Amino acid sequence: MIGEPRFRQERLGQQHDRASFRCAREEKLERYLTDPGRAARENNRNVSAVYVLLDTSQGDRIAGCFTISNTTLIPARVPLDIAKKLPRYDSWGTVKLGRMARHDEYAGLGLGSILIVRAFSVALSIAEQSGSLALVVDAKNETLAAWYVSQGLRALPESPLTLFITNAQMAAFVEALTSAGEL
């Protein structure tokens, strides 16, 4: 998998040292993971699946994390060039990338791209099991929205901070980065 062998992805568990995770740029994301119960509670109750990216060269330190859950996408919100290729339903099942953060000590090392590719891989796996057709994310601001666009996502026409990427586009993105050896 991308980023191996240095990074290993796991679903959050009691064995992970959440207390040492630092994300000063997004203190809410830091608190979400380090809070004694919040991320673990949501993960255990399957409110969202919390994944951690462990740095195996640093004793399995949490280098980053992301959450995945389910949502729906309303066809009227999707660009026509995509919507016209899909069945006419009231809504389509999708995967939601909720929270994503990296430890401060990994700034500037491209960990965001590793995290997004890992999230894409989880979303594609879910799609194989449940029929989800895309990944959706709500960006916190325009800067993050622009970063998501650079990772292959596309803004919804009437909601520029809500972005999506189809399964086919995710698979192509993962394949391109893997083939190019960028991750």
Image: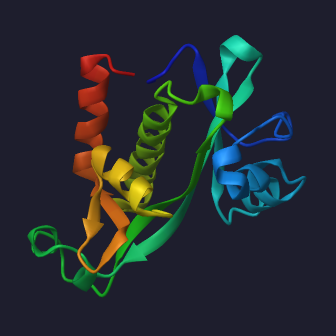
Residue 7 in the image: above or below residue 19: above
- On screen, residue 66 versus residue 16, left or right, reads left
Q: Residue furthest right?
A: 36
Residue 61 in the image: above or below residue 126: above
Residue at 32%, 44% in the rendered image = 151
Residue at 27%, 38% in the rendered image = 173
Residue at 46%, 63% in the rendered image = 141
Question: Dividing the picture into quarters, in which one does residue 2 lie?
Answer: top left
Question: Dividing the picture into quarters, in which one does residue 144 lie?
Answer: bottom left
Q: Residue 61 in the image: x percent, y percent?
A: 75, 25
Name the quarter where the C terminus is drawn: top left
- Number of numbered discs present? 0
Residue 136 in the image: above or below residue 171: below
Q: How is the image coloured?
A: rainbow
Closer to the camera in the image, 136 or 102: 102
Q: Residue 73 in the image: x percent, y percent?
A: 35, 76
Q: Residue 148 in the image: x percent, y percent?
A: 36, 51
Q: Please indicate, yes or no, whether residue 138 appears anywhere in the rendered image.
A: no
- On screen, residue 182 versus residue 121, left or right, reads left
Name the quarter where the N terminus is drawn: top left
Question: Dividing the picture into quarters, in which one does residue 11 lie?
Answer: top right
Residue 28 in the image: above or below residue 62: below
- On screen, residue 90 versus residue 123, left or right, reads left
Closer to the camera in the image, 146 or 33: 146
Q: Residue 116 in the image: x percent, y percent?
A: 44, 42
Q: Please indicate, yes or no, whether residue 90 appears anywhere in the rendered image.
A: yes
- On screen, residue 11 versus residue 80, left or right, reads right
